Image (spheres, grey):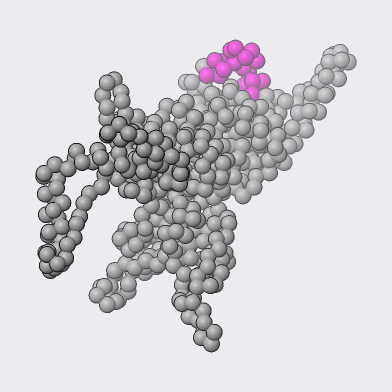
Amino acid sequence: ENYRSIKELDFEPGPYCVLIGENNSGKSNILRALNLILGERWPSERSFSEEDFHNQDTSKPIVIQVFFDAVIHENRHGVDIEIGGIELRCKAYKRRVGKKPAGSLSTDYFCLRPDGKQATAPSAPLRKGTRPTFLPMRVTSALREQAAPMIYVDVLRDYNRETPSSRWSVLRRLFNEVNTEFLNDKTHISVEQADGTKVKMTRKEAFEATVRNAYQYLRTESFEEIERRLAENAIKQMGLDADKNRIELHFESHDPTNAFKSLQLYVDQMGIRSPAGEVGAGLQSAIVVAIFRTYEEMKKEGAVFAIEEPEAFLHPQKARYFASVLRSLADKGNQVFLTTHSPVFVQVHEPESVAVVRRTPRKGTLVRQARKVDLADDDRKALRLMTEFDSQRNEMFFARRVLFVEGNTEKVALPLVFRALGFDINKENISVVECGGKTKIPLFVKVAKAFRIPYVVLVDHDIREIKEHWSDKRKKEERGRNKKHKRWNETILDTAGESRTFWMKPDFEGDLGLPRDESSKIDKALSRFDEATEEDIPDCLRDPVEKLMGGLT
């Protein structure tokens, strides 16, 4: 509530949640809100500014809540407490409070019960004969990391933000397990000493001894003088006697409890060695994708990933590859959020994974989701096969209005029809979606209806008149064909609605006088409408276009 473009928003993301919408609709604000409450930096009043309040109205607090699928059980002073989520709240003081003037920001960060109410815990261990005092239960770093550690990747794909030193980066999560194995490894190895003898020790002991010996070469006179002066000045600053209060300060090349977080990744290319954070943006992006792929291959789970515009810096083929990596991460027990302008990352056969983001002046940022679209397993499989390597059909999610057609002839001709009638489909954010045949149209219509995307259907009627002079065999075949198309037409009408369904009788080619030869009908359609004016457009095409553009909601 009341965060940036968001006035009030409640939505339920699944394991793979794709946020799509036009620029400035508020997609990134949703991810930023999640990053504030779950991300690497601990939230405080410094995490917010007046500009973060919706319409910069600080009279209402910013409220961000997240709830978890699994309840977390905590024991505080002997009391078992169920935690269903956490809440971050930021408010501005209406009057001076202590030394803080009016307008100063304050944050609260506490736990929620599964019913959404504030969780409370006893302030001290329970004692007989004493009435306990219950206080709001604050979020701890251990609880937040246990609940849902969030890994946020912005559009720049800067490797410097993904290094092992970053607490909740993907690499840090990978190396944390390696570090645990390293610290607990009791296997002894033989290590040769300077005098030629060999000593048995653990890997940890061998590493520390080797680093300690190598570290001596760094300790020049100037280095040691810096350490000495730091210690002397610290004692003086505290007003202590240097002879009676000896303090030593010294630098270490790594954290003894986790040496892996000090690792630096280097790139060797054409004989030049460079830190990964200093190479070109394209290569840094490739490295970040490789990190995600490695995480997915090693079957890690339990993290929340939030990625802005994963298509950035990627060719279409590599974007499809990255999309498969992210979907695989979600399938293996992680949760993936992403914002995108690319249909590659959208799955029309799983519309429940899509969240369409819109913004209005009165209501701010809104999210439309499809809770459960009525699609059979075979229908979902058909849609997946139709869109897996042809993402153009997925464009319907990004459109303001959609015209569904059967095949490619209509798909290439209709944009020219729109142009002749004075409409630029790209400017108006309209998609002409070729559905791969009449029988697939109801599947796409169901998805459009679930997201309240305005649509019309232009489809072949395909019911032909049976001629008396035909042979009995041909009449029988034609009756069977008509019966089949009649059944399909009824399904389209039942799904799309009569007012949104427009028929080409008997079909697109026949109604417009185009050849039926597959090799030439598209070219003929293009040549017919390429130079067409408004007067050249027949009613059978004018009517669906005007219906789509005439206030359809």
Which residue sits at x=54%, y=50%? 13
Camera sees residue 261: no
Total marks placed: 0
Name the residue nearer the viewer: 225 or 275. 225
Residue 165, picture quadrant: top left
Give the residues drawn in magenta, as a range.
508-526
Q: Extreme right residue here?
A: 472
Direction from residue 135 to residue 229 in the image, left or right? left
Which residue sits at x=30%, y=39%? 210
Q: Is 403 within the magenta?
A: no
Name the residue nearer the viewer: 370 or 504. 370
Direction from residue 131 to residue 156 in the image, left or right? left
Q: Quadrant of the N terminus?
A: bottom left
User: Residue 107, how many percent across, how many down?
Assistant: 37, 66
Camera sees residue 352: yes
Which residue sits at x=58%, y=23%? 408
User: Residue 435, how many percent across, how many down?
Assistant: 62, 30
Q: Is 524 within the magenta?
A: yes
User: Residue 415, how many percent across, how many down?
Assistant: 51, 28
Direction from residue 222 to residue 534 in the image, left or right? right
Image height of 219 relative to 281, above or below = below
Which residue sits at x=47%, y=34%? 293
User: Residue 379, how many percent across, how many down?
Assistant: 68, 35
Direction from residue 508 to residue 61 in the image, left or right? left
